[in-house]
Image (spheres, rainbow, N blue to C red):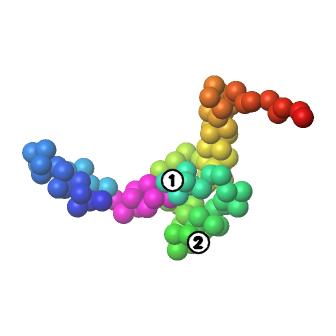
């Protein structure tokens, strides 16, 4: 990711490319993993840590450095946000009634 940022900065004539730390990059990967797997009921901090080959303690430390709430709270909040969005989506709200035969 840092190499891509440096190449883009070079092409945009920027002298100082905004490089990210390895922990920030890991946090972005963790956040993307959470978003991609919200629909799975077995998404828990332990499964996230195992999928990234890190300890549960390190997972909590990385998330705490970049996010104001814990991992489980973040998962719950994102699921509620997604449910709220789905309920407000008019395209999802109109369903054809079941026709009795």
Left or right, residue 25 beside residue 80: left
The foreground one among 61 and 45 is 45
Overall secondary structure of the magenta section: helix
Image coordinates of residue 53 in percent, x first then y, are 52, 74
Q: Quadrant of the N terminus?
A: bottom left
Image coordinates of residue 60 in percent, x first then y, are 57, 60
* Other-residue count near label 1 (Cα within 10 Å), few / some / many at <14 / 14–19 / ≥20: some
The foreground one among 22 and 38 is 38
Span shown in magenta = 21-30
The foreground one among 83 and 9 is 83
Total of numbered circles in the picture? 2
Kindly tell me whether residue 37 is visible in this rendering: yes
Using the rendered view, name the quadrant where residue 68 is placed: top right
Image coordinates of residue 30 in percent, x first then y, are 50, 58
Q: Residue placed at 70% from the left, 27% from the top? A: 94
- Distance between mark 1 and mark 2 Cα atoms: 15 Å
Residue 27 magenta: yes
Left or right, residue 17 beside residue 59: left
Q: Residue placed at 36% from the left, 63% from the top? A: 22
**Image mark for residue 31:** 1
Could you tell me which secondary element the residue under label 2 belongs to?
A: helix
Residue 68 magenta: no
Q: Residue placed at 59% from the left, 64% from the top? A: 48
User: Which residue is identified by label 2?
Assistant: 50
1 and 2 marks in contact (CB < 8 Å): no
Image coordinates of residue 97 in percent, x first then y, are 80, 29
Q: Quadrant of the C terminus?
A: top right
């Amino acid at each position: 990711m840092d190499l891509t940022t440096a190449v883009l900065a070079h092409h945009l004539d920027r002298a100082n490319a905004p490089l990210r730390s390895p922990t920030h990059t890991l946090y972005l990967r963790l956040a993307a993993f959470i978003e991609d797997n919200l629909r799975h009921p077995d998404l828990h901090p332990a499964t996230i840590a195992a999928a990234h080959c890190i300890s549960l303690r390190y997972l909590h430390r990385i998330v705490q450095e970049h996010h104001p709430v814990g991992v489980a709270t973040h998962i719950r909040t994102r699921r509620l946000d997604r449910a709220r969005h789905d309920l407000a989506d008019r395209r999802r709200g109109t369903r054809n009634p079941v026709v009795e035969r």
